[in-house]
Image: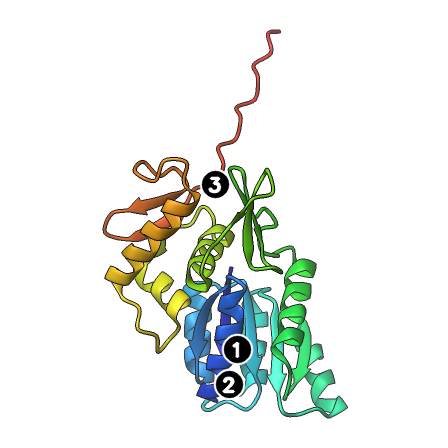
Amino acid sequence: MRVLVVDDDLQLASLIAFALRREGYQVLHAANGESALALWEAEQPDLVLLDINLPRLDGYEVLRRIRAVGATPVIMLTVRGEEDDMVRGLDLGADDYIAKPFSPKNLLARVRAVLRRSGRQPPADLTLGDLTVDVDRQEVRRADGTVVRLTPLEFRLLHYLLVNRGQVLPAELIIEHVWGYEGDGDRTLLKQLIRRVRLKIEPDPAHPRYIETVPGVGYTIAKPAQAMPEAHSG
């Protein structure tokens, strides 16, 4: 699930991105209205978090242009809390409206609600073989109740791969998610992290069947194979 964060306050955008990544979302960022529209058109995110006071094109105009051709869910983020501003945003087609300042917990709840209403909510299946990923407790358990001890980085990696199940995630994107924009992650550290997670969750770490390496690109957790429908003779 990809979220486009549009805000020229880089510190706030970084905090929003951190909160979203901890929940497994991929995050795109634009600091002005023009680049927001370009990213939206190129990447087709699942949700847009859109500030109103933007350089070049304000948030209202960005929303108007998105709504002219698309139905991507949009949550307006702004310091304006007046009723007229809220009404204007909602009349233009915003799905929700949050006045700054707001808590990450409230923001994430609104994001989940909007995605749920739009039919784009994140995958609910957070199981992998006999493993269940418990996001609230930040832990992984086997079917027999045994807890698989993962470090915060290991859990963040596994959760990110799992909520994006079926997608091949580039190594650079995983590094940015796990270590953050200004983290010290690199491809070598990512390989080591993948290896540690495989040792803890794979039935046979030497021949992994959960976390797959895609040479030259990155990593993925494949979607479960679907059973073929039985043939019926006429």
Q: Quadrant of residue 180?
A: bottom left
Identify residue type, mark 1. Answer: Ile
Q: Quadrant of the C terminus?
A: top right
Q: Earlier in the sequence, mark 1 or mark 3?
A: 1
Specify the label residue 225 is tagged with: none
In the image: residue 198, left or right of residue 123: left
Res. 93 visible in picture: no
Res. 33 visible in picture: yes
Look at mark 3 in the image and give the residue it sits on: 223
Q: Quadrant of residue 204?
A: top left
- In the structure shown, which secondary structural element does the residue marked by tag 3 occupy? loop
- In the structure shown, which secondary structural element does the residue marked by tag 2 occupy? helix
Question: Of residues 119 and 172, which is closer to you in this image?
Answer: 172
Look at mark 2 in the image and give the residue it sits on: 12
Determine the CA span between mark 1 and mark 3: 29 Å
Q: Is residue 111 above or below residue 131?
A: below
- In the structure shown, which secondary structural element does the residue marked by tag 1 occupy? helix
The crowd level at tag 3 (other Cα within 10 Å; few <14, some 14-19, many 20+) is few
- Give yes or no for contact between labels 1 and 3 (Cβ–Cβ under 8 Å): no
Question: Of residues 48 and 169, which is closer to you in this image?
Answer: 169
Q: Position of residue 144 (x, y in %)?
A: 59, 38
Identify residue type, mark 2. Answer: Leu
Q: Position of residue 107 (x, y in %)?
A: 63, 75
Look at mark 1 in the image and give the residue it sits on: 16
